[in-house]
Amino acid sequence: MSKSDAPQPAAPQPATPKPAAPKPAAPRPATPQRVLFVCLGNICRSPTAEGVFRHLVASRGLEHRIEADSCGTAEWHIGKAPDARSVAAARRRGYSLEPLRARQLCWEDFYSFDYILAMDESNLDNVRREAPLDYAGHFGLFLDFAAEVAEREVPDPYYGAGDGFVRVLELVEAASEGLLATMLQHD
């Protein structure tokens, strides 16, 4: 057997490249949680709740994670600014309601909001009647988030004296803290 007939060592094979590490998925933009506050005309209680809650969210730097809006179940005040007494009471506590305008609850709201919170049982009943069967969010009374408050409903201050608007603010502030804590737990 000649040298040329002898088995030759196999030529080194190129190393099989390691599979590439999977690229991390591009971060998805987080979808903000959305809350809708509901009263009858959207000029007293629900815009107050929206203004107070937005202020609280902004003070914690959470505007990118939580959004708020308000509406009424009736159509009487569509396009109108909040009641001047609500605006004045809110301003005295450092809240701005001036840019808000009344609107009516619509079917799109049930597909846009994670929480739909009524100020009283009557408006909650109206929301339930309008809700589609496939609504997957939470609706209930706003004051259910105020553990330290005995009331279950935010009273309508429209036909009362100025102190009613102050009481609305007190109730809304308490419920806003509880709602925010709940939303952050579910984030």
Image (tube, rainbow, N blue to C red):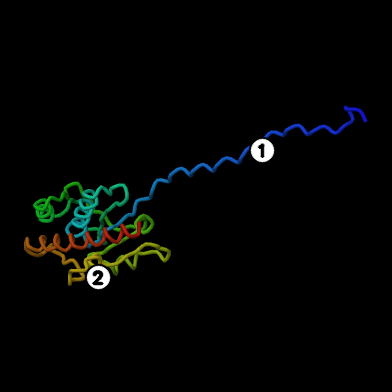
Amino acid found under the numbered disc labelled 2: Glu
Amino acid found under the numbered disc labelled 1: Thr
Disc 1 target residue? 16
User: Residue 50 got which mark?
Assistant: none
Residue 71: x %, y % from top left: 26, 57
Q: Residue at x 26, y 67 (%)?
A: 141
Tell me which numbered mark, 2 or 1, is placed earlier along the sequence: 1
- Label 1 element class: loop
Disc 2 target residue? 121
Left or right: 112 as drawn, with respect to 101: right
Which quarter of the figure has residue 46? bottom left
Marks 2 and 1, Cα distance to the nearest angstrom?
69 Å
Of 126 and 67, the residue lying toward us: 67
Of 74 and 165, the residue lying toward us: 165
Residue 160: x %, y % from top left: 9, 65
* Image quadrant occupied by the N terminus: top right
Of 8 and 147, the residue lying toward us: 8
Residue neighbourhood size for the residue with mark 2, other residues' Cα within 10 Å, grouped as few (<14), some (14–19), many (≥20): some
* Image quadrant occupied by the C terminus: bottom left
Left or right: 47 as drawn, with respect to 88: right
- Label 2 element class: helix
Residue neighbourhood size for the residue with mark 1, other residues' Cα within 10 Å, grouped as few (<14), some (14–19), many (≥20): few
2 and 1 marks in contact (CB < 8 Å) = no
From what the image shows, is residue 28 above or below residue 175? above
Residue 178: x %, y % from top left: 24, 62
Q: How many marks?
A: 2
